[in-house]
Amino acid sequence: MENISMTGTLLLMGLAELGNVQYLYSFITLVVFVTVMVLCLTIVVVTWTEEALHEPMYIFISNLMFTDMYGSSALMPKLIIDLMTGCMTIPLSQCLAQGFFLQSFTSVEIFTFTAMAYDRYLAVGHPLRYPMLMTNRKAFKILVAIWIYVYVGICAVLVITSRQTLCGVHINSVFCETISLTHLACGDTTLGIVFGFTWSMIMMVGCTKLPSKGGS
């Protein structure tokens, strides 16, 4: 086994399984990427230009659309290029960067859906108090808190992962994330596993506790 440094190269084995249909998948991925970007950008622009849509629910929807563009941009452009060129390699530094963006994308989406559920809970359960309980300012504060919490947590996970000794180069996927890198580690991964589990539990508890505050 060989230790992999930050300048080392990893192999995305999921691309090797596509065989002769890689160009078809490349075209499909390109169409999906362009469609996602156009539709999401349209929704964001319409929401921010129409004053009638300047409400908490639409603010959350705009954040969802932005997050979808954010996540798609982290994955699809490189995937399209790799499929067209037949490239299956990715430097470890780029692998960590891709993992950061993809994992923060999924975490922000989970929190945003939870915030939307909280918003609907207040609108249905407390219709008379809703304008005071959920304002545009509060919606923005919730979103800022979500992004900060997710970024801090994912950065900590990546720092822990980057300090692990990797003794393999084969990732059984078409993209990178920290779990795949942890599977390649040949040292002690206890710290990363414990931190990742703890951070996930805190995220889940935070999601489940939000609605209970509506009546306060």
Image (spheres, rainbow, N blue to C red):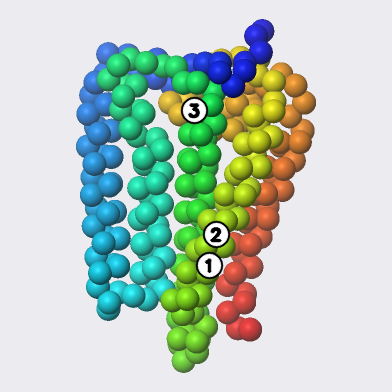
- Residue 94's disc is 3
The disc labelled 3 sits on which kind of residue? Gln
Which mark identifies residue 146? 2
Q: Are marks 1 and 2 in contact (CB under 8 Å)?
A: yes
In the image, 135 versus 179, the foreground residue is 135
Q: Quadrant of residue 149?
A: bottom right
Judge depth for marks 1 and 3 and give the one in front.
3
132 vs 5, nearest the viewer: 5
Q: Position of residue 202 (x, y in %)?
A: 68, 55
Quadrant of residue 66 in the image? bottom left
Q: Is residue 125 above or below residue 25?
A: below
Residue that appears at 25% across and 34% down: 30
Residue picked out by circle 1: 142
Compared to 121, does 8 lie above or below? Answer: above
Considering the numbered disc 2 on the image, is that residue within a helix, a strand or a loop? helix
- The quadrant of the picture occupied by the C terminus is bottom right
